[in-house]
Amino acid sequence: MVRETTTETVESALEIRGIEPVPEGERTGHPMQLFWVWFAANISILGLPLGATLVAEGLAFWQAAIVAVIGSVGSFAIVGVVSIAGRRGGAPGLTLSRAVFGVHGNAGPTLVSLISRLGWETVNTTTAAFALLSLFTILFGTVGEAKATPVLTIVCIAIFELLTMVVSGLGHKVLVAVQRWATWIFGALNIVVAISLVTTIDWHAVGSASPAPVGVVIAGIGTIAAGTGIGWANAAADMSRYQSPAVKAGSLIASASVGAGIPLILLISLGSLLAAGDPALAEAGDPVAAIRAMLPAWMAVPYLIAAVGGLLLSNHLSVYSAGLTTLTMGINIKRVYAVAVDVVVTFLGSIYFMLVADSFYDPFVTFISLLAIPITAWLGVFLTDMLHRKSYDPVGLMDMRSSSSYWYRGGVEPRAFFAWALAIVVGYLFSSNDFFTGLLAETWFGENGLGWVITFVISAGVYALLGGSRKVAA
């Protein structure tokens, strides 16, 4: 009898639904659920290096704090706007995107989104594995660096991936519950750690720092936006698809911008304070270890636990979204298996970065800047389409044949796809990274990191001029 009850409990918790739209009668969610989801996804320790990066670029603390507010709250307000589409259509964001780009034309944006999610998961997993390795060193004695202890390194990666798989595999209901309650636990740990870190701040260095020019501040806003909300925008509807149709748009925007904004503003600001007194933090190859070195020995264990916990909460949401995006690519498997596939990919990626590659965080920064362009281009088209579209055809979203209401021309909506592709090309012209330097990278917009803004304006403007946003919104 006990076994039967346990089995029934697991089955009721497991989300069976894939990417098909949620029937209206099953949409009973409320905005506070999303508040906790976005709060939990952003209490990761990665916010501290972001703040340190701002100081490395020349910003004074008060400027970094302003940048943190505008960049994080503003970019997550966009996440909230995309959430409105999830409430309207009851389907994941990239599935709803079929209505905009066509059932086949949507493959491009979907592939980019999947790569983005897998990249962030690899970042989370690698960083958490470094933290676990440090934790084992404290608890069981010196075990050496990652490359010196490959077996233990792989075990650390596997532990983190297993904990991710349990929650992301079970699905939406469990994810929402875990994100809410775990936020209180790991949030409290983060507060304790933050108080200890504040005692290490060089307040004289903070107060004597000269402010940076306006252009550097603008560039900092772009860095924070690209590293926070822009990277999550394509996952927004994945969580809001269970929201009640009665939920107001403003509530969805507030739940994302405030839920994510609170932890991000605090962590990014703290990171900038720490870096003002120790600029080496922004250049650390392993920021987790660098921050740990600032703490007293007795604080190391709670700090590392908080670091792993925050990264785990972020990874839950990212892997869940990646599973849905994998299904949107047309891979015909159950959602839980799609999650498993994504976990395997990031498991292998983390092994590479920890045991083979010479550097990890430099490629991470390049990764953010590269993917911010095509994701922003998708946002411009998708949000412009939302201005006129009030509903989505649930049958058409799932029909990949010529009978689909979103077939357009050979399965492609040419205006949307053209605007997206053109915006990507223009955006990269204003960009500069380790792989290439765009022809317009040395202009004012390029030097101030505004390539993603140009990308958004081009994609939204071209799509609107072509009349795409005024097509019949089925």
Image: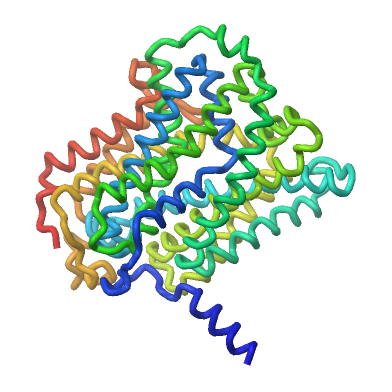
Q: Nearer the viewer, residue 411 or 221?
A: 221
Tell me the residue at 34%/59% (across/down).
Answer: 30
- The quarter of the picture where the N terminus appears is bottom right
Q: How is the image coloured?
A: rainbow
How many marks the image carries: the answer is 0
Horizontal relation, residue 104 to residue 328: left or right = left
For residue 126, above or below residue 281: below
The image shows residue 388, relative to residue 291, as above or below, that is below
The structure residue drawn at horizontal position 38% and vertical position 46%, both measured from the top left corner, is 256
Residue 421 locus on image (x, y percent): 29, 42
- Front one among 182 and 331: 182
Residue 278, image x, y percentages = 66, 19
Q: Residue at x 51, y 66 (%)?
A: 174
Q: In percent of the image, x 50 and y 31: which residue is there?
A: 435
Quick check: can you spot residue 130?
no
Report the side of 414 relative to 161 (left or right). Answer: left
Which of 102 and 168 lies nearest the eye of the viewer?
168
**82 and 449: which one is in front?**
82
| Relative image position of residue 433 (x, y in whole percent) | 49, 28
